[in-house]
Each structure stands twice: as C-alpha cells, then as structure tokens.
Amino acid sequence: MRKSRSLAFLAYLLSILGWFYVLLFHKKDKFAVYHAKQSVMLTIFAVATPMVWALISWILAWIPLVGSVVAATLFSLVIAAYILLGAAWIVGMVYALQAKRELVPVVGGWAERFFIGSEVV
C-alpha cells in the first residue's frame, strides 16, 4: 500500500508527468489510478478556466465602453478558481498520503462522471 500511496501522491505532485506516468506504467494499481484520474481533472480544469475567461472576454470586448471593464473584472473569477484548485490539489495530495479514496473538492465529481465506464472510478 505504501507504493500505491507514493504513486498517488506523485500523480498530484508532478501534475501532467505524474498522472501520465501512473496511467501508463501502473494501470493495475487501482488506488494510484483513481488519484491520477482526479489529478487529470484538476489539470483539465486549470487549463480550461483561463480559456473560457478569454473567450468570454473576447465576446464582451465587442460591447462598447462596458465590455472591456466587465471582462477585466471577470478575471477575479479566474483567480478565485485557481485558489480553489490549489486547495483541491493540496487536499488530493493529503488524501493520497492518508490512503483515502475520496473525491477531491470542486472537480472530483466531474472526474467521476468523465471517466464513467472506466474500471477504477
């Protein structure tokens, strides 16, 4: 179990490289793969958040006078999302080290739905 905990922690600690390593070379370790998939969803959310903000800002920029101000103000939501992601990332690492198989806050439920049909989640 100690190796599984280390691999699960590695999936969070090294982000893309960590979960890629676990999913590619340790597919049979169900605990580590569970946490690697949670880490995948954290990474997807971290990449998608500023992209969604950029798209909304671009659309709002076409509104004279007010659009740019609103778009700049919405950036505070991106910062709030990253604070939540940081907290979820730390919680995921703690769960991995404590050998708990629990969903990380914010995106854990999405990871479960995203990987539905998978043998682990």
Image (cartoon, rainbow, N blue to C red):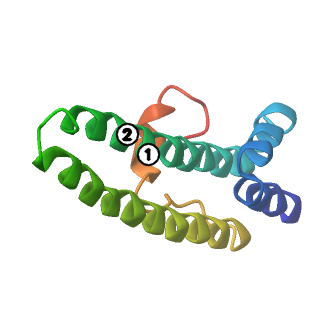
Q: CA distance from mark 2 to mark 1?
A: 6 Å
Which class describes the residues within 10 Å of circle 1: few (<14), some (14-19), or many (20+)? some
Residue 35's place in the image compared with 112, above or below, is below
x%, y% of residue 14? Answer: 78, 54
Could you tell me the amino acid type at mark 2?
Ala
Q: Is residue 63 left or right of residue 106?
A: left
Q: Residue at x 27, y 38 (%)?
A: 56
Q: Is residue 67 left or right of residue 114?
A: left
Total labels: the figure holds: 2
* The C terminus: image quadrant: top right
Q: Is residue 70 left or right of residue 44?
A: left
Q: Residue at x 61, y 38 (%)?
A: 120
Which class describes the residues within 10 Å of circle 2: few (<14), some (14-19), or many (20+)? some
Q: Are marks 2 and 1 in contact (CB under 8 Å)?
A: yes
Where is mark 2, residue-wise?
54
Where is mark 1, residue-wise?
50
Q: Secondary structure at mark 2?
A: helix
x%, y% of residue 24? Answer: 82, 31
Frontmost residue, 64 versus 101 = 64
Frontmost residue, 56 versus 64 = 64
* The N terminus: image quadrant: bottom right
